[in-house]
Amino acid sequence: MKAWFAGLAALLCLGAAPPPPGVALDLLLAETPAPKLADYRLFTDAAGRKINAGLTPYALNTPLFTDYAEKLRFAWLPPGTRAKYRGDEVFAFPVGTVLVKTFAYPADLRNPAENVRYIETRLLIHKASGWVAQTYLWNPEQTEAVLKRAGARVDVAFVDNQGRARSVDYAVPNQNQCKECHQLDETITPIGPKGRNLNGVLDYPEGSENQLVHWTRKGLLGGAPSSGTAPRTARWDDPAEPLDRRARAYLDANCAHCHNPRAVASNSGLFLGVEETRPAALGIGKGPVAAGRGSGNLQVSIEPGHAEASILAYRVASNEPGVMMPELGRTLIHDEGVALIRAWIDGMKRP
């Protein structure tokens, strides 16, 4: 999984030089965020390409779409600690954990390890008081990333997987926007590293291995069942997976962090996590709580067999503010994701 990591393995491996200073746990736990990403010593080079000892790469079976950005994810746990496995929820991480996610664009998505431009690196740090989100913006020279509380806009150009020239007014979120998406029970929390979303194979520098097996073997995770019996989120872009599982995984990754009973869209009654089984809660035959331009004058969230009559399909296919869903995290329409959701709805039969 994730040829992106395999292509960058040589850059991410630690060299044979004397070991550099370790990750700065004292700064991670400090009340005031560090002004520069380099202060934390998560990477051993100024460009953030070489990870420090103890950082573990990970990838999600189905990630959130963010304007076609590539994402490099790493976890660092304080030495001697480990996370507790939870299948359908985010691992229970110890205090001091930092989850690192760098958003980057290769010049050509068909060659993901070449001419890569870093845009931002986001940190989720588990402090004694709870999780804290911080964002660091990379400079054009790719030599430094500085704390950015207020958000930013960055012009990005790239060639997509179909060979088309694309451009995006990339939005770096402000601190409040981070909190809006990463909120569960009114508390900031990670979204991606759930047991079922890490139950997949990753190309590590030393070879390919299931991530649950790898974390357990490295002493980073306790309580995980065998990968064959553990729940697993489907790969949204794997045509070998059933269409229903792929579409549900896509909605889980892109929508369920808000559309669940414990998050900011709980009043919508539309709950899109993979665990949801009630047809009405999934939007089948369900009218919107508040009609308006976001509904496109359509009557129900999902009209089985008719994507063109379904609000859900209408909103994921829009990039118009006030209409598009998700509301944050993208400015482009995800053509492949839209096609998946439409095919899923068109293939439905009313229960």
Image: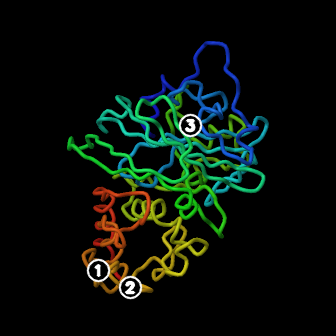
**Residue named by callout 2:** 285
Q: Please tell me whether mark 2 sits on a helix, a strand or a loop.
A: loop
Name the secondary structure under disc 3. strand
Local secondary structure at mark 1 = loop
At label 2, the amino acid type is Gly
Three-letter amino acid code at the position of disc 3:
Pro
**Residue 256 in the image: x percent, y percent?**
51, 66
Q: Quadrant of residue 245?
A: bottom left
Mark drawn on residue 210: none
Using the image, tell me which numbered label, if any, was put on residue 57.
3
Q: Is residue 149 left or right of residue 6?
A: right
| Structural crowding at the residue carrying mark 3, measured as other residues with C-alpha within 10 Å and reported as few (<14), some (14–19) or many (≥20) | many
Q: Residue at x 42, y 86 (%)?
A: 290
Mark 1 or 3, nearer chain start: 3
Left or right? Give the position of 301 relative to 71.
left
Q: What residue lies at 67% left-to-right and 31% top-to-bottom?
A: 54
Q: Quadrant of residue 341?
A: bottom left
Residue depicted at 64% across the width and 33% down the height = 39
In the image as oriented, which residue stretches furthest toward the left?
164
Q: Residue under circle 1? A: 296
